[in-house]
Amino acid sequence: MKAIPHHEKDLLPSDGPSTMTAIAQHVYGPDPEAVLCPEEVATPTMGADEVLVRVHAASVDRGTWHILAGLPYPIRLAGFGLREPKHLNPGRAFSGTVEAVGADAAGVEVGDEVFGECDGAFAPHVRAKTAKLSVKPGNASFEEAATMPISGVTALQAVRDQAQVKAGDKVLVIGASGGVGSFAVQIAKAFGAEVTGVCSTAKVDFVRSLGADDVIDYSRTDLAGAALRFDAVLDIGGNGRLSDLRRLLTPRGTLVIVGGETSGRLLGGSGRQVRAMLLSPFVSQKLGTFISSTNEADLSALRELVVSGQVRPVIDRTYSLAEAAAAVRYVIDGRASGKVVIRL
Ligand SMILES: NC(=O)c1ccc[n+]([C@@H]2O[C@H](COP(=O)([O-])OP(=O)(O)OC[C@H]3O[C@@H](n4cnc5c(N)ncnc54)[C@H](OP(=O)(O)O)[C@@H]3O)[C@@H](O)[C@H]2O)c1
């Protein structure tokens, strides 16, 4: 059984079970099948400023794999464990029902249906900080709500804060068919933008179904040579060259580099991001990147977009907890359209 650290002030709900079957990860490794397996572990305790949640669903994203593999290496310095994983498993985005509330945890009650971010979400019970939780949208299932904390919040912060999209803007979403992109297309549309999505051939119809006004198939159209100009380009996938991305922008347009997978173990291909930030002060376009941060206010803002019907979390596949490795494999193989969920 993997030892879960107990702190002096930690509390255990008096009538809860002391163990649970959860996904455990003891070593870093690139193969989900080799490092993720169900195991009997201690039920988490909670701190005074935390709540204990019975998890109904958790979602998978590209970051799940990075935490699982411990790659690129800087992720280990970001609190996930230097030599071995610090947390029970790499799951982070979840939804569930509050079972117990710490003495200093305000604004949440036992029985509340919530969604948010925590460590070790591929488990029947998690401890979570109230600052990273919000009330689940009433019109969303637990599975749908579990997709929102990381992918949805990243998309919201990219569209609203980084690109500052407003009505009438022309927005290009590169990587529109994925977890972040499927939210970004819908959020940009909700803000009144004219949205063009970029994805592979098989997912063109999917991106159109999200509400994109136009869809570009990157396997048939060379974006670098396209005579198109956008007020904002959200670069979520594909690792396009900075000069090519700039050519897609209007003279005062904004480039937001959200991500893009590379095999770089040291910096994870972040050279592009660094060059964009260094160049930005010297050109008329705004070139930047950011690391999203889940917080209660943005989870609530996202909830309102879902409640109003402007945004709909889209789930491609749902797996059981025991199939967590297969769920991560499906995402890293690039097969998912929208989000992949683990149902508990
Ligand atoms: N900055 C942050 O805070 C932050 C937060 C979350 C995620 N991220 C990063 O954002 C990236 C996307 O994450 P995700 O969870 O949305 O991943 P995902 O679900 O796997 O989506 C990846 C997207 O990239 C597209 N893509 C792949 N190859 C492409 C190419 N050559 N040209 C254009 N598009 C291409 C895919 O399209 P097809 O599937 O149609 O090929 C898909 O739409 C990852 O690198 C992740 O690490 C960053």
Image: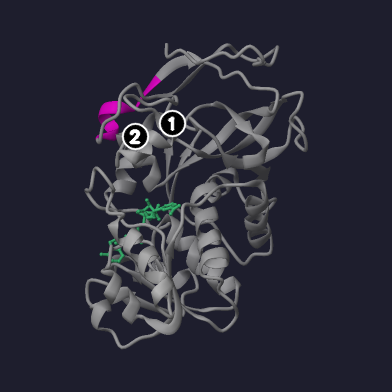
Disc sitting over residue 68 in the figure: 2
* 201 to the left or right of 6: left
**198 left or right of 333 in image:** right
Residue 107 occupies quadrant: top right
Q: Is residue 38 above or below residue 159?
A: above
Q: Secondary structure at mark 1?
A: helix
- Residue 111 on image: x %, y %: 74, 32
Residue 249 sits above or below residue 257 on the image: below
Magenta residues, as a range? Answer: 31-38
Image side of residue 243 versus residue 210, left or right: left
Quarter of the rendered image showing ligand 1: bottom left
Residue drawn where x is 39% and y is 75% of the image = 282
Q: Nearer the viewer, residue 241 or 199?
A: 241
Q: Position of residue 239 (x, y in %)?
A: 28, 63
Label 1 Cα neighbours within 10 Å, binned few <14 / some 14-19 / many ≥20: many
Residue at 54% of width from left, 35% of height from top? 118
Q: Is 233 contained in the magenta span?
A: no
Q: Does the rendering let one see residue 217?
A: no
Please provide percent x and percent y for residue 109.
77, 33
Q: Amino acid at mark 2?
A: Leu
Identify residue type, mark 1.
Leu
Q: For numbered disc 2, what is the local secondary structure?
A: helix
Q: Residue furthest front?
A: 282
Q: Which residue is mark 1?
A: 321
Residue at image location 42% in from the left, 29% down from the top: 89
